[in-house]
Image: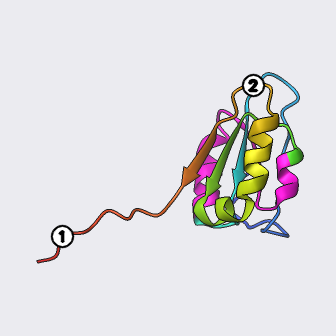
């Protein structure tokens, strides 16, 4: 899914839905260097769906990686998807490092 050139519509890149035994990861975040790097690493072992819009939640996937801004926008949709899931539904939230930095 990942490539060196950005997709035509980077806000909602169509992904591949796993039809076989390979687990599918939804990268629910805007097109960015972070999403590109995550996709590049994960696509070696998983099918990747990269999107930002709530419609992506209707696709079949095994784990959702979401950035903080998108999580805030789609919180209710994610919670509903989790409630409707018949199996464990992991959501991994990526946020900014807010660790206080020492000042000299």
Q: What stretch is highlighted in magenta?
A: 34-57
The mark tally for this picture is 2
Check disc 2 and report the residue beneath it: 87
Based on the displayed image, in which of its 4 quarters is residue 102 positioned? bottom left
Q: Provide residue 94's location: percent of width, then percent of height.
A: 54, 55
Residue 74 appears in the figure: yes
Check disc 1 and report the residue beneath it: 102
Residue displayed at 59% across by 62% down:
68
Q: Look at the image and tell me in which quarter the C terminus lies.
A: bottom left
Mark before the other along the chain sequence, 1 or 2: 2
* Nearer to me, 1 or 64: 64
Answer few, some or many: residues within 10 Å of disc 2's Cα (few below 14, many 20 plus, some between 14 and 19): few
- Residue 30 within the magenta-colored segment of the rendering: no
Residue displayed at 69% across by 51% down:
27
Q: Provide residue 89's location: percent of width, then percent of height.
A: 70, 34
* Nearer to me, 93 or 10: 93
* Nearer to me, 44 or 76: 76
């Amino acid at each position: 899914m990942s490539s060196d050139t950005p997709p035509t519509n980077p806000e909602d890149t169509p992904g591949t839905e796993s039809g076989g035994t390979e687990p599918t990861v939804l990268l629910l975040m805007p097109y960015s260097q972070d999403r590109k790097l995550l996709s590049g690493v994960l696509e070696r072992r998983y099918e990747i769906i990269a999107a930002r819009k709530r419609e992506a939640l209707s696709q079949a996937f095994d784990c959702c990686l979401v950035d903080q801004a998108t999580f805030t926008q789609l919180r209710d949709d994610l919670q509903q998807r989790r409630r409707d899931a018949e199996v464990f539904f992991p959501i991994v939230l990526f946020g900014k490092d807010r660790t206080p930095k020492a000042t000299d």
